[in-house]
Image (tube, rainbow, N blue to C red):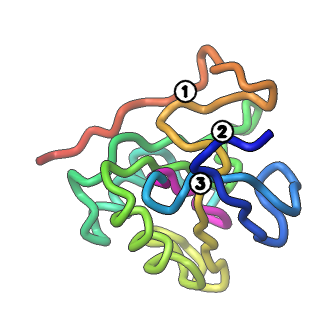
Amino acid sequence: GRDAGFVADASPQGAFGQTARELPSTEARKTVMLQRIQSTLTRCDVERALDSLGFGGRYESVYVPMHRGSGLSMRYAFVTFFSAADAAVCIDMCTGRPFPGAESHDLLCNAEYARHQGPAPVSRRGVRRRGSGLQPAKNKA
């Protein structure tokens, strides 16, 4: 059954290939997935880019999955904001534009609500992963 407070999101295809996903209500969505970012961007680079967009001090954590062999990012990042309003503004500001710090302006970012909400990555089995590389944001308030 469905949990109260969840609504179906009919985005064409999410990070894990689903065609329809259940997400918390809009008021509870604070984690954004930034897709199609430069593979050379690190967590610190993403934090600097968010700060340049005016989000300094307004996000709780940034997670950038990295390829183990190459050390390059998987070209996406998760950002958990303190407020749902900031998450919505980030989606509007980043979608369809080059992400700040991108070397190419041909690579347009796609931002959407993350399937899993919250600062810690969760495996497909619903178990929090150890050693995920998640670091709290180093906001300079």
Mark 1–mark 2 distance (CA, rounded to whole Å): 9 Å
Q: How would you rate the neighbour count of disc 2 (Cα within 10 Å): few for under 14, some for 14-19, many for 20 or more?
A: many
| Res. 66 mark | 2
The foreground one among 79 and 74 is 79
Quarter of image, res 125:
top right
At a point 54% along the width and 57% down the height, the residue shown is: 25
- Asked whether residue 123 is drawn in magenta, I would say no
Q: Is residue 49 left or right of residue 39?
A: left
Q: Earlier in the sequence, mark 1 or mark 3?
A: 3
From the image, tell me which residue sits under label 3. 40
Q: Are marks 3 and 2 in contact (CB under 8 Å)?
A: no
The foreground one among 9 and 6 is 6
Q: Earlier in the sequence, mark 1 or mark 2?
A: 2
Above or below for 96 versus 66: below
Amino acid on which the number 1 mark rests in the picture:
Gly
Q: Position of residue 82 (x, y in %)?
A: 31, 48
Q: Which residues are magenta?
A: 29-37
Q: Are marks 1 and 2 in contact (CB under 8 Å)?
A: yes
Q: Is residue 89 left or right of residue 42?
A: left
The foreground one among 104 and 107 is 107
Above or below for 51 versus 43: below
Q: Is residue 133 left or right of residue 58?
A: right
Q: Position of residue 62 (x, y in %)?
A: 45, 44
Mark 3–mark 2 distance (CA, rounded to whole Å): 10 Å
Amino acid on which the number 2 mark rests in the picture:
Met
From the image, tell me which residue sits under label 1. 133
Q: How would you rate the neighbour count of disc 3 (Cα within 10 Å): few for under 14, some for 14-19, many for 20 or more?
A: some
- Asked whether residue 30 is drawn in magenta, I would say yes
Quarter of image, res 34:
bottom right
At a point 80% along the width and 31% down the height, the residue shown is: 124
